[in-house]
Amino acid sequence: MIEFWFSDVCPMWCIFDSDANYNRRFASKTWASSELVFFAMQSMSAACMLDTLPTLTPVLSALTTKAMATIQSHLSSFRETPRTTTLRFPAELLFAIFAMGTSLHWKFGYELGGELIKDAQHLIGYYKGKLPAMSISDREHFAYFQKALICWEGLLCAADRDFVPAPLVTRRNAHIARIRADLNEVMPQELQFGPPGLPLSDLELHPWCGVSSEVLQKFGQVMSLCHLARRRRENIAQDIELELRCDIEIARELASELAMMDFNVNSHWIYAPTNDSDTPITHLLDIAETYRQACFLQLCLTFDEVSVDASVYPGLGLLGGQIPITRIQGLIGLSIRLVEQLRKIPPESGSRCMQPVLYLCVACGLQIDSPPRFDCQTSEGGSKLGPNMDTTFTLSTLKIAQARSFVKKRLGMLQQLLPPSYTETALKLAEAIWAEYDCTEGGGSPLYWFDVMVRERLQTFFG
């Protein structure tokens, strides 16, 4: 099981894999001496093997129970230790928490890891105030897990609408206070707007965040904001107008921040090499750019108040100077551009572990706005066959069909390269979204994909 973890699980669980991968280095040093690391690795391996060796089911259950019990035992010891005692940073405990929290869905698709992420947040929050007293080694461990938490939170926001990341709460509180102050014509003191500062440099590669923890933090905020806005529009609540105004302001602010981010592949030289032949640094820059575009697409799908970038129109095949007559065309343009970005990243790239949720994001925008027509004109001889008989597609419809085919093909490939449980679920969800679009005349309004996910019981952690 341990050998399988190093040969198969670790490369699949990380965005790149080599001697530069923190997870590989840490597991190599600790698995033989730490029960936390040992049982977490064994459980992950069993979950990964289950699809081809279903007889491992009782073994997986036993290993998962043992790994979780070991985590809880160490958490209890941590809670019972007096705070006056100098505590060593619990890197092994956090490794086990992250390992189990991000792999339980490989077997139990409905398990989102919500309780374990709370434990991780508590531990990292506690030690954040202890940084000056930490050793250099413990600070390095802390820096890794702080970034890993940003990634975990970002992906969880897509799957769990009840999970709201702290940076979004901070942002909302500032906007709500300002809006209320505007209404009362009184300016509040010391309000902070814009993104909460990220204290860590992104120049050091991270096996989950790649080149940017900031874009993943933005992704989590965008997904959570979209969930909140959708629920508010469905329910009548006190101060609903104030909340909706706040949602729109935050959406515009996030869109502006995303527009300022730059992941130009020509800047690859400023980063250390990945030492992974399957995943050069350009792949990590491409995946960061893909998340940036996915964020913007989700904001535009949810908020009509967020303007669609006019640069996407050429992707629709519109003639020079022609402007789309509907917002739907602009959203389709954003989606086609995101598909073209995804095409840059080969399926065998190590970044595949971060790709499934991106294919879901783009699937939401692949809405056919002009259904194909079948033209059949009768010739002079009465025959209905000939050059006048054809099925008419608009260029955008053809591009959408090609994009959908690409999404299905890539998700199918990912089922062979990642645990099939959640990649299969992602494909089913994409097809369910398109089916709902296609049964509505003219495509209807843009769908909120989370509604389809819950209704079709396809909720899982897509990462």
Image (cartoon, rainbow, N blue to C red):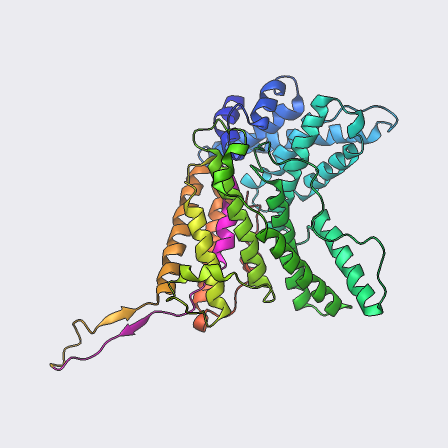
Residue 413: % across, % down: 40, 42
Residue sitting nearer the eye, 40 or 61: 40
Q: Could you tell whether 430 is left or right of 36 in the image?
A: left
Q: Could you tell whether 336 is left or right of 183 in the image?
A: left
Residue sitting nearer the eye, 113 or 83: 83
Residue 459: % across, % down: 57, 51
Q: Could you tell whether 310 is left or right of 400 in the image?
A: right
Residue 112: % across, % down: 62, 45
Magenta part of the protein: which range? 351-380
User: On the rendered image, what quadrant is the C terminus found in?
Assistant: top right
Residue sitting nearer the eye, 346 or 77: 346
Q: Residue at x 59, y 52 (%)?
A: 258
Residue 116: % across, % down: 69, 39
Q: Quadrant of residue 198?
A: top right
Q: Quadrant of residue 333?
A: bottom left
Whether residue 112 is visible here, answered yes or no, is no
Residue furthest out toward the left: 381
Q: Could you tell whether 121 is left or right of 37 in the image?
A: right
Vertical side of 432 occupied by 323: above or below: below
Vertical side of 306 occupied by 107: above or below: above
Does the magenta portion include 356? yes
Residue sitting nearer the eye, 413 or 229: 229
Vertical side of 282 occupied by 241: above or below: below
Does the magenta portion include 44? no
Q: Residue at x 51, y 40 (%)?
A: 285
